[in-house]
Amino acid sequence: MSTTHEAGWAHASGALRGPSWLRPPSDPDALVPHLWSQTAHKVDGELHVGGLSVSELVANVNTPAYVLDEVDFRARAGAFRDAFAGYDVFYAGKAFLCTTVARWVQEEGLSLDVCSDGELTVALRAGFDPARIGYHGNNKTVTELRRAVAAGIGRIVLDSFDEIDRLAMVTAETGTTARVMVRVTAGVEAHTHEYIATAHEDQKFGFSITSGDALEAVRRVLDAPGIDLLGLHSHIGSQIFDSSGFEVAARRVLALQARISTELGVVLPEMDLGGGFGIAYTTQDDPSDPAQLATEMSKIVEHECRGLGIPEPRLSIEPGRAIVGPAMCTVYTVGTVKPVELDGGAVRTYVSVDGGMSDNIRTALYDADYSCTLASRTSDAPPVLARVVGKHCEAGDVVVKDEFLPGDVAPGDLLAVPGTGAYCRSMASNYNHALRPPVVAVRDGVARVVVRRETVEDLLATDMGDQ
């Protein structure tokens, strides 16, 4: 039974001891390899990524900064491409997208998901093949649909009856045909945070299979001129570590596909299984590798189709954060170290860094766990249980809830947090008018800024008070 406190998780009974899975490190200088990108390692206590030390990196761009390991990114993209050969593998633009990353995704043979006009703009600016782009979203406007159709987007994932009507209007007025998938909710809850579990009934995405809305949506799409239905789309959530949830979802979605064939006389050629595969943020996380996931998911679909007597559709998956998440870390500079004595003589050490919830909202939003390491030097000091916090005017501004750091951690030290490639820069904000950090891609000893740091001029450009 979990213990709660009116002031939140940080003040609950046992919070000072840290989580049960966190243990003092035997070697404070060592990295836990599966938490970091492939080229990350330490030399005399200093973190190196892509052949460069973090001290060299931040000397040019300052901190905080996101460091993106190109070798790691491409390797993970290639691993999903190869493991899921015969599938369409869609990289999640919402996890992190810039023109450079879009080009990497295309070069590695993956397709791309976007879910806004802004993401589509970045993809097209990068020269991404629109036929390999999927367009998600639960409230696409007529303007957005017009642009997607005009660009020749490979598939639009329909999410409501209103959207079916809007798209039919757009194709009628333009004399074009749009290729679509119908997003369905299979009533399967992934074992993840409520806000990122997307297949249960009481939420905003998709058409319910149970209520009959999904079948009705398919009927309407088939009746609509100018809309070509490719298949059904299902997504059960994010940060998922095994295939058990996919088995139940695939069974229900394929059963609907069989009904469509029997009752409507249409054999749908494709199906999207979703994905949202998990990554290791801390030592408690144990994600499956792409080959294992591919084997298990393919067997599930083959078994269900054989039992239903229907042909196997061409499959798509969406790995989500699993490609870019581990490929990036965030580097901060320590500003203050504050041991706080609490009731009973216990002490909590607060290590404040020069970023926070403006560059990583996930801890505050999802109660997410992260790890970190002293990145700029070696230390022989005994480890202490610390909480890494940001500089924002918010008590919930926590970056790493609990981590063992050397007891001599001090202002000016560099800390690095792994696993920040997904949903950190893409969800970053200007809270307290913070400037969003740069993204620096590194490979073979060369660093290049692929997203520059915001400037004060960027902030003031939208402030019209003196105009």
Image (cartoon, rainbow, N blue to C red):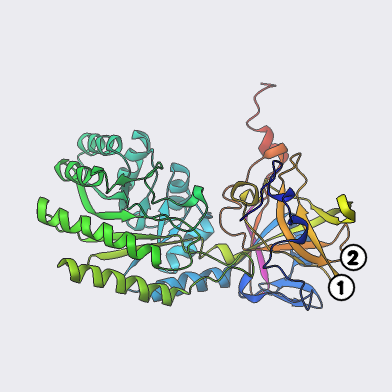
Q: Residue 8 location in percent, x, y?
A: 69, 45
Direction from residue 346 to residue 181 in the image, left or right:
left
Q: Secondary structure at mark 2?
A: loop
Q: Quadrant of residue 129?
A: bottom left
Instruction: Look at mark 1 in the image and give the residue it sits on.
Output: 379
What is the chief secondary structure element of the magenta stretch? strand
- The quadrant of the picture occupied by the N terminus is bottom right
Q: What is the spatial separation of the Cα atoms under label 2 and label 1, in whole angstroms? A: 8 Å
Residue drawn at point x = 24 percent, y = 60 percent: 254
User: Do we see residue 152 in this rendering?
Assistant: no
Residue drawn at point x = 50 percent, y = 47 percent: 195
Residue drawn at point x = 38 percent, y = 41 percent: 138
Q: Are marks 2 and 1 in contact (CB under 8 Å)?
A: yes
- The quadrant of the picture occupied by the C terminus is top right
User: Magenta segment, which residues?
Assistant: 445-451
Instruction: Look at mark 2 in the image and give the residue it sits on.
Output: 408
